[in-house]
């Protein structure tokens, strides 16, 4: 129609009229007069096409009456629909309730339908929001109190700006429901804390003060570690002072093993010295009596017995178990019996030391020594024998004719110490060369070439 106002203007006018009507209803309730329209539950209004602004005052009154009649019809239809949902049969047909009020101009029906569709969409959105809120409140523990106000058919009225008084009541109810839900959630959280679930309920607070708690925990851990390290150091110092491996902390295995090994070596040296003194003087020392016998002691006794029975007791100067070299039985032979003893150790049927595994010389400043290590593949046993020679004239028989493996070790001893082996087929310097002056492994060696 000509001069038709836009949809927003129609909405504003309908809202203003609805507010005026609500104000009139509230004034009537205060005066004890209840309007006739309050008997039916209020529902969303169908907008009516506004009359031209040039109409008279009587025309406005007619329009207001028509709107009231249409609103009453809509409310009646809504009540009928509610009764049907609740299972109450109503004989009055819904078609009559939904019929438009008589006298409403047909020219604005299209605009009214569009506005009704928009309001219906707004109501659907409001219902969906209320359902989501109700579900959230149920998860929070207050679903029972919050579900009743959200499920009432007055929810669409929140979307209708014209229902001022009812909207205020609904807002108050919602606020009360939210307050009840919060109180219920607080009570539930407190109950969980009392029942042992304080850790889950206090997570937000723990997150807020997490940095302080972490800092305190780190400081406490550092203090504990420092105290433990100090205690361990004190225990180790005490064990070192007392000389007891038993007092070393159990966690310090490497230190304990090192201490035990050092003690074992010291005890072995003491036992060897005591054994030598006993063999020479005929009296055993106190340390030898306490030392545990070596598992190779029977072998040493066997070798000495066989040698003395076949070569005499004057051949050996000394014999002992070398604790510092895997308890190997060791013989100290006299200079003049060196070569004969070597032959006996290899060719005797009871001994049979057919393999020479090592031969080297040592400078002791007062004298030099030749050390020979042998092994018997037949008996699975080993023995070592050594001989002392003059440092000024270091000359000894070569063992190369007995064990061919003595060839290069004797050349090395000649090259570095100057020991001469008589009977060697090719004694020569194998590392330094014949033009080299001096023997580097002697204690009094001075380099001839200072640049070297």
Image (cartoon, grey):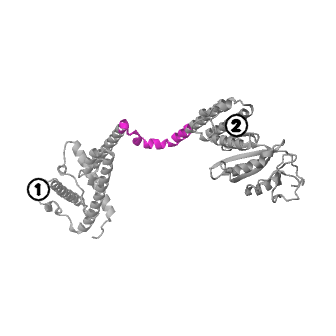
- Check the image and name the residue furthest to the front: 310
| In the image: residue 311, left or right of residue 32 | right
> Residue 90: which disc?
1
| In the image: residue 115, left or right of residue 95 | right
Mark 2, residue position: 272
| In the image: residue 155, left or right of residue 431 | left
- Is residue 82 rendered magenta in the image? no
> Residue 276: which disc?
none
- Check the image and name the residue furthest to the bottom: 2
Please, what is the dominant secondary structure of the magenta stretch?
A: helix
> Residue 278 location, x and y as percent?
71, 32
Q: Are marks 1 and 2 in contact (CB under 8 Å)?
A: no
Secondary element at tag 2:
helix
Graded by Cα atoms within 10 Å as few (under 14), some (14 to 19) or many (20 or more), the crowding at tag 1 reads few
One can see residue 160 in this view: no
Graded by Cα atoms within 10 Å as few (under 14), some (14 to 19) or many (20 or more), the crowding at tag 2 reads many
The quadrant the C terminus occupies is bottom right
Which residue corresponds to the image point at 59% horizontal and 40% vertical from the top-left? 253
- Check the image and name the residue furthest to the left: 91
| In the image: residue 85, left or right of residue 187 | left
> Residue 66 location, x and y as percent?
20, 59
Nearest the eye: 83 or 252 = 252
Magenta highlight range: 192-220
Nearest the eye: 250 or 264 = 264
Secondary element at tag 1:
loop
Q: CA distance from mark 1 to mark 2?
A: 122 Å
One can see residue 351 in this view: yes
Q: If you read the primary sequence from the N terminus, does the residue marked by circle 1 or circle 2 appear first?
A: 1
């Amino acid at each position: 129609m000509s001069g038709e106002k836009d949809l927003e203007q129609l909405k504003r006018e309908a809202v203003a009229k609805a507010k005026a009507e609500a104000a009139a209803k509230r004034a009537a309730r205060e005066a004890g007069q209840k309007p006739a329209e309050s008997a039916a539950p209020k529902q969303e209004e169908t907008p009516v096409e506004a009359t031209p602004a040039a109409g008279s005052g009587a025309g406005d009154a007619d329009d207001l009456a028509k709107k009231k009649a249409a609103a009453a019809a809509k409310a009646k239809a809504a009540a009928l629909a509610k009764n049907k949902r609740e299972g109450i049969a109503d004989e009055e047909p819904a078609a009559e309730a939904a019929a438009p009020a008589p006298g409403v101009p047909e020219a604005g029906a299209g605009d009214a339908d569009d506005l009704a569709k928009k309001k219906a969409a707004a109501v659907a959105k409001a219902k969906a929001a209320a359902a989501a809120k109700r579900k959230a409140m149920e998860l929070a523990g207050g679903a029972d109190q919050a579900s009743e106000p959200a499920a009432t058919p007055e929810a669409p009225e929140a979307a209708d700006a014209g229902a001022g008084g009812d909207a205020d009541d609904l807002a108050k109810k919602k606020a009360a429901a939210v307050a009840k839900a919060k109180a219920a959630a607080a009570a539930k959280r407190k109950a969980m804390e009392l029942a042992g679930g304080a850790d889950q309920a206090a997570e937000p607070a723990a997150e807020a003060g997490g940095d302080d708690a972490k800092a305190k925990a780190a400081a406490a851990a550092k203090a504990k570690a420092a105290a433990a390290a100090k205690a361990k150091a004190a225990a180790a110092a005490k064990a070192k002072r007392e000389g007891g491996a038993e007092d070393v902390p159990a966690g310090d295995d490497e230190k304990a093993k090192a201490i035990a090994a050092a003690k074992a070596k010291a005890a072995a040296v003491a036992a060897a010295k005591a054994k030598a003194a006993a063999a020479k003087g005929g009296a055993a020392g106190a340390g030898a009596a306490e030392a545990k016998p070596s598992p190779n002691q029977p072998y040493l006794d066997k070798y000495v017995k066989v040698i003395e029975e076949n070569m005499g007791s004057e051949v050996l100067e000394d014999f002992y178990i070398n604790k510092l070299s895997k308890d190997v039985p060791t013989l100290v032979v006299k200079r003049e019996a060196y070569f004969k003893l070597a032959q006996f150790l290899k060719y005797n049927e009871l001994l049979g030391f057919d393999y020479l595994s090592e031969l080297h010389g040592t400078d002791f400043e007062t004298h030099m020594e030749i050390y020979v290590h042998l092994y018997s593949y037949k008996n699975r046993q080993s023995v070592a024998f050594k001989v002392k020679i003059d440092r000024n004239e270091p000359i000894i028989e070569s063992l190369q004719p007995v064990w061919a493996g003595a060839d290069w070790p004797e050349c090395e001893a000649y090259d570095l110490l100057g020991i001469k082996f008589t009977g060697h087929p090719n004694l020569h310097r194998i590392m330094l060369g014949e033009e080299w002056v001096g023997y580097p492994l002697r204690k009094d060696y001075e380099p001839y070439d200072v640049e070297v």
